[in-house]
């Protein structure tokens, strides 16, 4: 570093030779002299020899600078000195020194450009440091000037200004506090001047200011005091308003209205206080009527005493005058009954129409209905009045409320249906809708068919006391009672979908008893098409075998329903609860209830049963009654314009307000997989939940019929006969879709087309297509078993599925026979053999007896043997066959034993039959 500093101190650069002279003395000793350098340059340079000389130098010479070379060499001298040896050793050291000097000189010369460049950088750095020193000195000088001339003085001014502002704010706060403390005086003055709006405005402003300065302890309690003052002002407002009743003054009334507007109480009764105020009003009116009732009781009691006393005294003149007075008082009191009750109705009517109750919660509105229903009971006991004014008032409010409520519920039902995955809701086998708290009122109420006034006289002693008798000594029938939480407790769900004490059962199981057999199966077998009962009844063994077809999960057959079904049932309970409290709206409620059922039925049909190709089969899958019901629902309830107007630009009319868009099946429900029998589990849950819902409506029919007006009962009967009873009819079209895809009927037609039917000898072996078809049925049976592990398949459902599949198979067989181009007598016998083999194997797979459409196939095969005359009559009688099938029968089967003229005659008969269908 000293060498670098010395170099920095120079004014200019020197040559390397001159620079070498500036080295330290030790380093100077180690460098060769000029003469030696010249000698070194003159000597030839052998790099290898030079390197060998350097390598021969002892390691000690390469130690630190503090090493004393002279002392080291002197210590090495031998005790006896030899001049010749010393000179030789000296020459060796000189050679080593010369080699090192040469090596050092070469290295210096090699690094000279870099040395010069680095020296220039050092010089530049020195210049920059000198400039930085000057800048720092100037900056410090200016900072000292700023500190002395500006900072200390200015910051002092700013600090003083901040203190001044704080003091000004504090002074303002103190003035506000002083004003707040003197507010009471000013408020009292304004109230005396009847300046209610000004007093309220001032009180509100003081409340706001008090909340702002709440952190001051001197006004911490001022806010509560101002609230008390505001309530006192409101009480004085009520007094001022009452004065208007006697003497109306425009200015005075204007001030009162302005004051109420400032308080935000222009309606006087808020939604939160509506029910308590109604209860208080009814309690006050009850006290008035109770006093009047007790007054009449007193007169009746004293009149009987006076009558007894006069009869014992025997005074005729006095008794006539006394009777006249008693009759006069009695008539006056009786006249006052209806007058008082009329005033009560008008007051409650005014209160009812003073608030729009369409936004009330359901429980709140039910509570209002309960109060009014109890009040109407009071009126009937008070003066025998039917309370037409109250009934009409609450009817209008109820209809207004119920329309909005029902519209919201319909939208919710659509949302439920569109998000429904049609999974089972696990309820207990003992589930009953009466266990739901929405139906608790049915257990608590009297029989709806018998009113208190129409009960027989023999049961008068068991009739509950009237409200006047019950509360004559104390209490009030309009006290608000808190609903007990215990009543809302339900225990209808089963654990994991099974009964807690029942393990999971296999799909097929033997039944020990016939307690779970439907009642219609315990009776004689009923034909599904005609409803007739055959002469021969079904044996117990047949019933037992049929029960084995009931694919079930557990021994107890729990109801099949979904969460959406349960939601609809709860809504029905709420609707009936409202209807039981207010019978004048019974028809409207039943109409809305029917819409709930209609929409559910329409959704199930739309999701799982709508298939226009089914109607073309001519099998009557959808009855005319079912088609009429579905068309009616679509026209009256379904808003079809929503789907055709995605932008929503259509105007909403009154008719469209009552309609609901058609629901859409959830994308989570897959109906296209053959492994799941095309969503059979979901189809079963949806269809059977609809059937279960229809059964609950059937159970509720007597209760609905009891409260329906006589003129509206035909609507209820029509709803049950044309809608509720059609729920089970949806099974056929819905399960027909599964049956149509579960078996590969097209493959069977292809296999039948490859069969040679014009054989010359009677065959003993049936054709392959029969075995293929039977394998399809076996696979269908296995898949049905797999589905039953998820959802219990009831006996009617399994029967319908098997019936559909067999019916389609038989009709496919007839269609295959109708496609035959050539057929011999032996070929016709082969057809009979194939079909008999199919029936024999099929009867082992299913318990359905008789086999559906068995005669359809057999009759077609046997028609081959008919004569010409019999064939013409047969064609006219059997219109269940298509014209193609009949034509093939004439051309192929009969062509061998009738002439051409007879064939043309039969074809003309077929054409005449087919012409009306076109």
Image: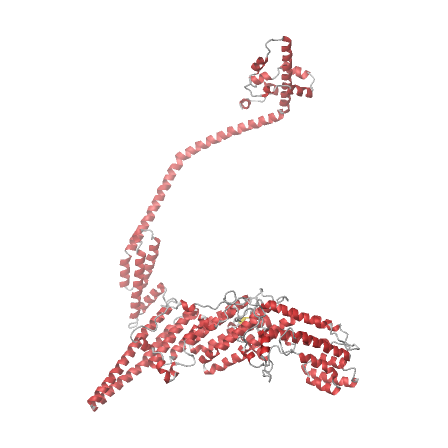
Determine the image quadrant of residue 785: bottom right
- In the image, 709 versus 130, the foreground residue is 709
Would residue 821 be found to the left or right of residue 42 on screen?
Answer: right
Would residue 595 be found to the left or right of residue 824 on screen?
Answer: left
Would residue 5 be found to the left or right of residue 264 on screen?
Answer: right
Is any part of residue 848 visible from this angle?
Answer: yes
Determine the image quadrant of residue 736: bottom right
Is any part of residue 644 visible from this angle?
Answer: no
Q: Quarter of the image for the C terminus: give it.
A: bottom right
Image location (x, y in percent) of residue 711? 47, 83
Image location (x, y in percent) of residue 722? 54, 79
Image location (x, y in percent) of residue 327? 27, 86
- How many numbered marks appear? 0
Image location (x, y in percent) of residue 406? 48, 72
Establish if 512 lies above or below 206: below
Q: How is the image coloured?
A: secondary structure
Establish if 492 lies above or below 896: above
- In the image, 636 versus 878, the foreground residue is 878
Determine the image quadrant of residue 85: top right
- In the image, 18 versus 514, the foreground residue is 514
Q: Quarter of the image for the N terminus: give it.
A: top right
């Amino acid at each position: 570093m000293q060498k670098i500093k010395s170099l920095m101190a120079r004014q200019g650069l020197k040559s390397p030779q001159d620079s070498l002279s500036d080295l330290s003395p030790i380093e100077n000793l180690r460098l060769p002299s000029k003469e030696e350098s010249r000698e070194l340059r003159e000597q030839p340079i052998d790099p290898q020899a030079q390197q060998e000389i350097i390598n021969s130098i002892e390691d000690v010479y390469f130690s630190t600078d503090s090493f004393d070379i002279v002392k080291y060499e002197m210590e090495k001298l031998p005790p006896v000195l030899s001049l010749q040896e010393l000179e030789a050793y000296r020459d060796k050291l000189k050679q080593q020194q010369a080699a090192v000097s040469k090596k050092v000189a070469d290295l210096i010369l090699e690094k000279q450009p870099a040395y010069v460049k680095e020296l220039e950088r050092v010089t530049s750095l020195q210049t920059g440091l000198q400039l930085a020193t000057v800048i720092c000195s100037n900056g410090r000088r200016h900072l000292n000037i700023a500190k002395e001339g500006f900072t200390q003085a200015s910051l002092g001014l700013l600090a003083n200004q901040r203190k001044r502002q704080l003091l000004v704010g504090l002074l303002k706060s103190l003035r506000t506090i002083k004003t707040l403390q003197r507010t009471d005086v000013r408020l009292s003055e304004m109230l005396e001047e009847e300046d209610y709006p000004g007093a309220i405005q001032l009180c509100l402003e003081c409340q706001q200011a008090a909340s702002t300065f709440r952190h001051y302890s001197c006004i911490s309690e001022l806010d509560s005091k101002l609230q008390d003052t505001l309530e006192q002002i409101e009480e004085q407002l009520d007094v001022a308003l009452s004065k208007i009743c006697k003497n109306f003054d425009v200015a005075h009334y204007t001030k009162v209205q302005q004051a109420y507007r400032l308080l935000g109480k222009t309606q006087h009764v808020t939604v939160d206080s509506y029910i308590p105020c109604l209860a208080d009003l009814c309690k006050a009116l009850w006290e008035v009527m109770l006093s009047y009732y007790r007054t009449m009781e007193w007169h009746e009691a004293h009149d009987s005493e006076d009558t007894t006393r006069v009869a014992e005294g025997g005074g005729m003149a006095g008794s006539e005058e006394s009777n006249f007075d008693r009759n006069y008082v009695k008539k006056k009191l009786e006249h006052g009954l209806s007058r008082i009750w009329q005033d009560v109705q008008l007051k409650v009517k005014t209160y009812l129409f003073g608030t729009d109750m369409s936004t009330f919660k359901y429980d709140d509105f039910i509570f209002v209905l309960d109060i009014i229903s109890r009040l109407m009971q009071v009126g009937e006991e008070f003066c025998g009045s039917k309370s037409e004014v109250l009934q009409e008032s609450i009817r209008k409010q109820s209809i207004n409320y119920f329309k909005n409520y029902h519209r919201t519920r319909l939208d919710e039902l659509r949302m439920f249906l569109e998000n429904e995955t049609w999974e089972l809701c696990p309820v207990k086998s003992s589930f009953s809708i009466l266990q739901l708290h929405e139906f608790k009122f049915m257990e608590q109420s009297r029989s709806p068919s018998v009113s208190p006034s129409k009960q027989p006289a023999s049961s008068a002693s068991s009739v509950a006391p009237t409200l006047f008798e019950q509360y004559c000594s104390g209490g009030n029938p309009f006290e608000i009672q808190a609903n007990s939480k215990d009543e809302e407790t339900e225990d209808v769900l089963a654990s994991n979908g099974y009964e807690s004490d029942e393990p999971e059962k296999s799909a097929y199981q033997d039944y020990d008893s016939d307690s779970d057999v439907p009642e219609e199966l315990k009776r004689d077998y009923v034909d599904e098409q005609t409803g007739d009962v055959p002469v021969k009844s079904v044996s117990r063994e047949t019933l037992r075998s049929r029960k084995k077809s009931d694919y079930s999960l557990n021994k107890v057959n729990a109801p099949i329903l979904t969460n959406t079904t349960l939601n609809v049932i709860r809504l029905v309970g709420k609707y009936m609860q409202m209807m039981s409290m207010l019978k004048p709206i019974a028809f409207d409620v039943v109409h809305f209830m029917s819409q709930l059922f209609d929409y559910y039925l329409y959704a199930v049909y739309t999701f799982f049963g709508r298939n226009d190709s089914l109607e073309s089969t001519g099998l009557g899958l959808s009855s005319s009654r079912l088609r009429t019901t579905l068309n009616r629902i679509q026209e009256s309830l379904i808003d079809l314009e929503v789907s055709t107007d995605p932008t929503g630009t259509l105007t909403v009319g009154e008719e469209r307000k009552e309609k609901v868009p058609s629901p859409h099946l959830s994308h989570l429900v897959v109906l296209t997989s053959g492994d799941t029998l095309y969503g059979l589990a979901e189809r079963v849950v949806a269809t059977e939940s609809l059937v279960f819902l229809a059964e609950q409506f059937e159970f509720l029919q007597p209760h609905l019929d009891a409260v329906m007006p006589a003129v509206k009962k035909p609507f209820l009967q029509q709803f049950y006969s044309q809608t509720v009873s059609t729920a089970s009819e949806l099974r056929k079209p819905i399960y027909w879709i599964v049956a149509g895809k579960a078996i590969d009927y097209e493959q069977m037609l292809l296999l039948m087309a490859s069969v040679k039917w014009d054989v010359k000898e009677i065959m003993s072996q049936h054709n392959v297509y029969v075995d293929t078809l039977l394998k399809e049925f076996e696979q269908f049976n296995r898949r049905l078993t797999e589905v039953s592990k998820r959802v219990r398949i009831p006996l009617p459902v399994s029967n319908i599925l098997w019936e559909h599949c067999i019916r389609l198979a038989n009709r496919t067989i007839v269609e295959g026979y109708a496609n035959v181009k050539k057929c011999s007598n032996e070929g016709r016998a082969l057809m009979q053999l194939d079909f008999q083999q199919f029936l024999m194997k099929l009867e082992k797979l299913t318990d359905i007896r008789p086999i559906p459409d068995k005669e359809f196939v057999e009759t077609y095969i046997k028609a081959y043997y008919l004569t010409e005359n019999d064939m013409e009559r047969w064609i006219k009688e059997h219109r269940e066959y298509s014209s193609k099938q009949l034509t093939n029968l004439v051309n192929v089967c009969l062509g061998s034993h009738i002439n051409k003229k007879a064939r043309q005659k039969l074809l003309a008969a077929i054409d005449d039959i087919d012409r009306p269908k076109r």
